[in-house]
Image (cartoon, helix red, strand yellow):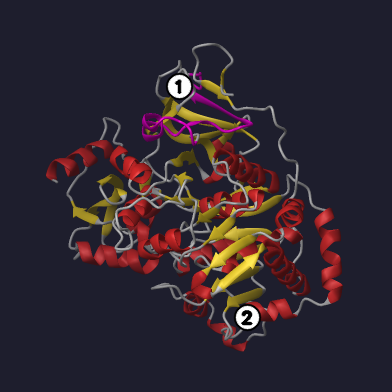
Amino acid sequence: MVQIAPTEGLSHVIGDQSNRLLNLTLPEFFNYTRRKFGLCEAVVFSQFNVRWSYSELLDKCDAFAAGLLALGLYKGDRVGIWSPNRVEWIIAQIATARLGIILVNINPAYKGTELEYCINKVDLKCLIFATQFKSSAYAQTILDLCPELVEQKPGHLHLKKLPSLRVLVQISETPIAGAYSFQEVVKKATSGYFERLDNIANGLRPDDAINIQFTSGTTGSPKGATLSHKNIINNAVSCAKAMNLTHYDRVCIPVPLYHCFGMVLGTLACCSAGATMIYPSEGFEPDKTMHALKSESCTAVHGVPTMFSAMLASSEFNGKPIKSLRTGIMAGSQCPEVLMRRVLYDLGCSEITIAYGMTETSPISFQSDVNDPVDVRVSTVGRIQPHCEVKIVEDDGSTCPVGQTGELWTKGYLVMKGYWNDTEATQSSIENGWMKTGDLATIDNEGFCRIVGRKKDMVIRGGENIYPAELEEFLTAQNGILEAHVFGIPDEKFGEQLVAWIIAEEGATLDETSIQNLCKNALAYYKVPAIVRFVKEVPLTATGKPQKFKMREIMLNKT
């Protein structure tokens, strides 16, 4: 039951605490899954002809964990994974947790400079990577970063640009020089290493760090949000309960595993209930997703609004509701009411839930109920999650009255341990246990939350968070660019689209295409501005600060 506290009339809500939080490690959590749901179908990757029960999946995870142990990887080491959705991603997620290794999620859209930054930021010891996905040539990118690999022995790497990296594991039968194949690691799992797994797992603690997810910061460089066993287990369980998931459910997961959305609300939520995970493709493809919903009799589907819009426009969708479909999660950005009603009625997902959160809160703090009225689900992000506390605050930190807009702060088990190796950023984001989200919101008398804007100028494009400062820093480092100002404008397809205003140096020869190509070659695709404008000046405040809201207004008046 949601409460308004501490005083009637204030925007301060506390989630239900009638059930205890789970004080478990991930190995204990997966042992429960094996005991209760071992014979249930766990994972389906039709693209790779994979269809395993939970017992089969967890056996494969133990074998890979024993192999990692044989390579000299231990509790507290950081192991990264750079890959689209593959069954090896899930195996790596569970296997690293078995050993207390901290899994580092690396966005598969990252380019070489971004990969290099992430590896060095967390002193990564091992990187698991795919060979290629679409235009992302992961193996070639690593060879370009580290040409000396051709002379090095797998497992004993010494790389100039990546000094902490000792082991490369490629999801391929024919790995590059200096790398093991995924199956080679499994083959190293002798009986002696298997026998050590339980003793290692027994030495883990629920509050230990187990996952690092990079989230861009306003200072320009990605920050490593560090999550514990307790963080992600309890959030997954709460979200699964909100959807009423059971072992009869079959959840379609087209969202990426490197996000909390796929890894926590997908994998871990399904493991908590014994539900089947259905992965329609390596990356989101609307036709394959729609085909999977029907052919696998899915009862639930996750996605950001742009994904649902694409599904409804798919040639695989015949306009009739999918009879098996019931629930799922829509999150990542605001959902237009027209789209929400189409998901409910045209797609047939009548119990779809809306969720709100952020990586730093494991991720979900608000979620609608499957029985909430339609008008509530199209206009709010639901009510507070169990064991979570939220308040809406004024600029001075005081709590706003009910219905008044302010910044949303979150507190409870779900708040991250901090940003990896970044005390200053952690202290500026977490105050006395409260995570400052930077989002502007209101809470009504019934505890329903509405997200009304962002205190900071973050842009959300198709569910991807983009912080303009990172792109501005990159652009101003390029020859011929004096100033760069980046902001978002509304976009029907992606929710928001990225705009860059540039003041060029005198005599510089730059155009929109050259700027976009610079970004394409160095940054993830979603950080490439869709619109580039060259200007002589930008609107400023009396103290000389750029006024992005005025830039936005000018762009909207031109379109």
Q: Which quarter shows the N terminus?
A: top right
Q: Residue at x 29, y 36 (%)?
A: 544
Is residue 179 left or right of 140 when viewed as pictured?
Answer: right
The residue at which mark 1 appears reads as 394
Residue 352 screen position, x and y as percent:
45, 42
Q: Which residue is mark 2?
A: 181
Q: Is residue 19 above or below residue 129?
A: above
Q: Decide whether residue 218 is among the magenta residues.
A: no
Of the pair 189 and 557, the residue shown nearer to us:
189
Q: Position of residue 554 (x, y in %)?
A: 17, 41
Q: Secondary structure at mark 1?
A: loop
| Of callouts 1 and 2, the N-terminal one | 2
Given contact means CB atoms under 8 Å apart, are the residues at marks 1 and 2 in contact? no
Q: Could you tell me which residue is drawn at 59 percent across and 63 percent down?
A: 43
- Residue 305 is marked as none
How many angstroms separate mark 1 from mark 2 (CA)?
A: 53 Å
Could you tell whether 542 is left or right of 259 in the image?
Answer: left
Residue 393 in magenta stretch: yes
Task: Report the residue that reaches farthest toward the front.
Answer: 323
Q: Residues within 10 Å of mark 1 (few under 14, many from 20)?
A: some
The furthest residue to the left: 558
Q: What is the three-letter code of the residue carrying label 2? A: Ser
Can residue 491 be seen here? The reply is: yes
Viewed as shown, does residue 73 lie left or right of 89?
right
Q: Magenta region: which residues?
A: 370-399
Determine the secondary structure under disc 2: strand
Query: Percent x, y for residue 170?
Result: 59, 77
Amino acid at pointer 1:
Glu
Q: Residue furthest bottom?
A: 151
Pointer 2: residues within 10 angstroms few (<14), some, or many (20+)? some
